[in-house]
Image: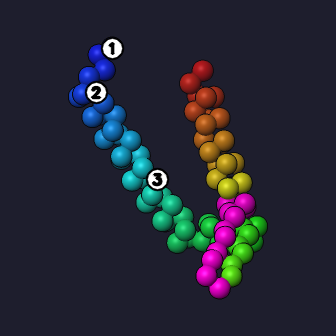
Amino acid sequence: MDFGPQQIGKWLILAGIIVAVMGALMVLLGRAGLFRLPGDLQFSGRNWRIYFPIASCIIISVILTLILWAISYFRR
């Protein structure tokens, strides 16, 4: 397979589209309240804030696991 500048350009465009879609998804899920779940920890002081989205990460992990399992199941 020839891996020239045109092929690299196509991969970069695809990567940019994927990043843009993921960013839009994060904004929409944030507005829906996903990153404000009871299991998400937030520590803050006067000039700093640390946020650990534990519950949100677990939910995203379960959803991605189910999607990838379904893809694997139907590809057989």
The one nearer the camera, 14 or 6, is 6
Q: Is residue 50 magenta?
A: yes
For mark 3, give the secondary structure. helix
Can residue 68 be seen by looking at this rendering? Answer: yes
Question: In this rendering, would 75 be left or right of 56?
Answer: left
Task: Return the residue at label 3.
Answer: 22
Label annotation for residue 7: 2
- Quadrant containing the C terminus in the rendered view: top right
* SS state under label 1: loop
First in residue order: circle 2 vs circle 3: 2
The x, y position of residue 42, in whole percent, is 70, 73
Q: Would residue 37 be visible to someone looking at this image?
A: no
Q: Does the CB distance between marks 2 and 1 fall below 8 Å?
A: yes
The three-letter amino acid code for the residue at tag 3 is Met
Q: CA distance from mark 2 to mark 3?
A: 23 Å
Q: Is residue 8 above or below residue 56?
A: above
Instruction: Give the residues in magenta.
Output: 46-56
Q: Which residue is mark 1?
A: 1
